[in-house]
Amino acid sequence: MGELKFISTYSKTAQIIKSHGFQVKKSYGQNFLIDQHVVNKIIAGSGVCADDFVIEIGPGIGGLTERLAPLSKHITAVEIDKNLIPILEDNFAGYKNVDILNQDILKTDIEDIIASRGFDSAKIVANLPYYITTPIIMSILEGNAPVKSMTVMIQKEVGQRIKAAAGSKDYGALTLGVTYRAKAEFIANVPRNSFIPRPNVDSVVIRLDVLEKPPVKVDCEKLMFMIIKAAFEQRRKTLINCLFNLLDLGLSKEELAALLEKCGLNPNVRGENLTLEDFARLTNAISIRACRNR
Ligand code: SAM
């Protein structure tokens, strides 16, 4: 098979864009992959195989889609840009196992997509739009959809945040969300000249394998994610101030200080110094106390 056959090459991508008169939109984070070596790494790293149902986020003109389609049982590709839909429909007209949805992934019910196509789980594969990488990953980690893994191209700096150690500047809600739900595997470094248009950042590909069971026991996951997000919203403030200012827990600062001490934490601690285990212990203590106060 010659390289030019594939969409994710410079000449084929340029030809598709030109023949459809398509205007690339920076506002949608459109950077199309033009390197088959990178595509090979994403495909191999995703571990997608014949029985798998794949959800692709942001297919663009279909460079990854065309390589995933022959390997998987079915692909649903969710693309926000209506101007890309005729291009995708054109490129995948002969494919029975590809369907294209013109939707915002952040407003899409992934659980419903999986069930409505007759599957009980999905693997997600995406070259993510950089402007919403974290919200997309967090919404999937926080949701209940039966996702087995997410193989995603992300900005290199976001990759560093995922792997960050407690106390470091990169440590935050994303680090904790990923640690709670998944095991992160590094797949590849991707230089910025692998795309057109060329972005201002380098990228990495990672795979998040969703854990069968989280590493800590939490009575109310939703509350833990709320506490974690509040803790990093104003990361230079103490945890007590963040929780008091941003969440309506029905607890005074004195009550919050007592709960932190009960959990073995200094009342002046900042969120960035807490591990996932600390957040889980604190969440369980807060949920018992907040319920009692209501
Ligand atoms: N998969 C293609 C590739 O690798 O060449 C395109 C990747 S490009 C980095 C990101 C894609 O995500 C674009 O096609 C963009 O229009 C789409 N996109 C941006 N925001 C989106 C959203 N909220 N929901 C679904 N797709 C989105």
Image (cartoon, helix red, strand yellow):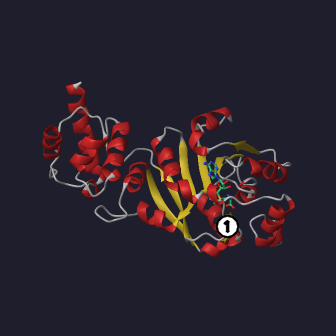
Residue 1: tell me if it is visible: no
- Name the residue at the top extreme: 294
Q: Is residue 194 above or below residue 172?
A: below
Which of the 4 image quarters holds residue 167?
Answer: bottom left
How packed mark 1 is, by other alpha carbons closer than 10 Å (few <14, some 14-19, many 20 or more), is few
Q: Looking at the picture, how far across and down is residue 11, in whole percent? A: 81, 71
Residue 205 is situated, as x and y percent measured from the top left of the image, at: 56, 64
Identify residue type, mark 1: Asn
> Horizontally, is 79 left or right of 219 in the view?
right
Above-or-below relation of 40 to 177: below
Disc tally is 1
Task: Tell me which residue sits at (74%, 53%) in the image.
Answer: 69
Q: Position of residue 287 (x, y in %)?
A: 26, 34
- The residue lying at 82 percent from left, 62 percent from top is 16
Q: Residue at x 62, y 54 (%)?
A: 125
Q: Which residue is mark 1?
A: 40
Disc 1 residue lies near ligand 1 with CB under 8 A: no
Can the viewer see residue 208? yes
Q: Looking at the figure, which quarter contains the C terminus?
A: top left
| Image quarter hosting the N terminus | bottom right
Q: Write the residue at 50% across / 51% down.
A: 137
How far across and how far down the image is residue 261, in percent?
13, 46
For ligand 1, the image quadrant comes to bottom right
Q: Assign a secondary structure to mark 1.
A: helix
Question: Which is more toward the observer, 47 or 57?
Answer: 57
Residue 136 horizontal side relative to residue 213, left or right: right
> With respect to residue 67, does 98 lie above or below?
above
The image quarter containing residue 6 is bottom right
Residue 273 position by quadrant: bottom left
271 left or right of 162?
Answer: left
Question: 96 or 76: nearer the eye?
Answer: 76
